[in-house]
Image (cartoon, rainbow, N blue to C red):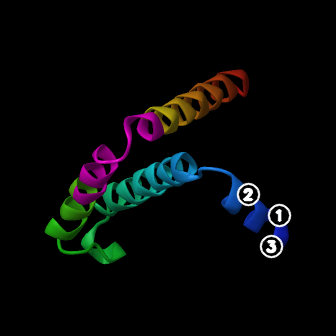
């Protein structure tokens, strides 16, 4: 596996994949920070500004990624949302 990955790294331009991956990770952490805003004190809620700054930072960093990476990431999330909605409606 290591040889295959090394061959890909040496022969392909992986910047697009890196940008796409970064977009996904930043959205994931933005969602995690937004979820922390819903916690109550007895559930271990952090000091309110911490997740707010976390969400803002993630979204700001995601906005600085190459547009193609962000658009591809948004497309993947949109497809996932549609699949989730279809499954939700058919499981009723």
Which residue corresponds to the image point at 32% horizontal and 64% vertical from the top-left? 39
Q: Secondary structure at mark 2?
A: helix
Q: Are marks 2 and 1 in contact (CB under 8 Å)?
A: yes
Q: Secondary structure at mark 3?
A: helix
- Quadrant location of the C terminus in the rendered image: top right
Q: Give the residues drawn in magenta, as a range.
A: 57-70
Name the residue carrying label 3: 2
Q: Is residue 59 magenta?
A: yes
Q: Are marks 1 and 3 in contact (CB under 8 Å)?
A: yes
Q: Is residue 17 magenta?
A: no
Instruction: Name the spot of residue 78 as percent of width and height, x first.
Output: 52, 29
Mark toward the start of the polypeptide (2 vs 3) = 3
As displayed, is residue 49 above or below residue 59? below
71 sits left or right of 40 in the view: right
Name the residue carrying label 2: 8
Which residue corresponds to the image point at 47% horizontal and 57% vertical from the top-left? 25
Q: Could you classify mark 1 by the number of other residues whose Cα lies within 10 Å: few (under 14), some (14-19), or many (20 or more)?
A: few
């Amino acid at each position: 596996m290591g040889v295959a990955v090394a061959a890909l790294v040496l022969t392909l331009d992986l910047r697009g994949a890196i940008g796409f991956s970064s977009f996904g990770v930043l959205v994931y952490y933005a969602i995690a920070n937004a979820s922390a805003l819903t916690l109550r004190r007895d559930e271990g809620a952090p000091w309110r500004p911490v997740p707010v700054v976390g969400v803002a930072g993630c979204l700001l960093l995601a906005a600085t990624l190459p547009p193609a990476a962000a658009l591809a990431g948004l497309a993947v999330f949109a497809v996932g949302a549609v699949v989730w909605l279809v499954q939700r409606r058919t499981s009723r």
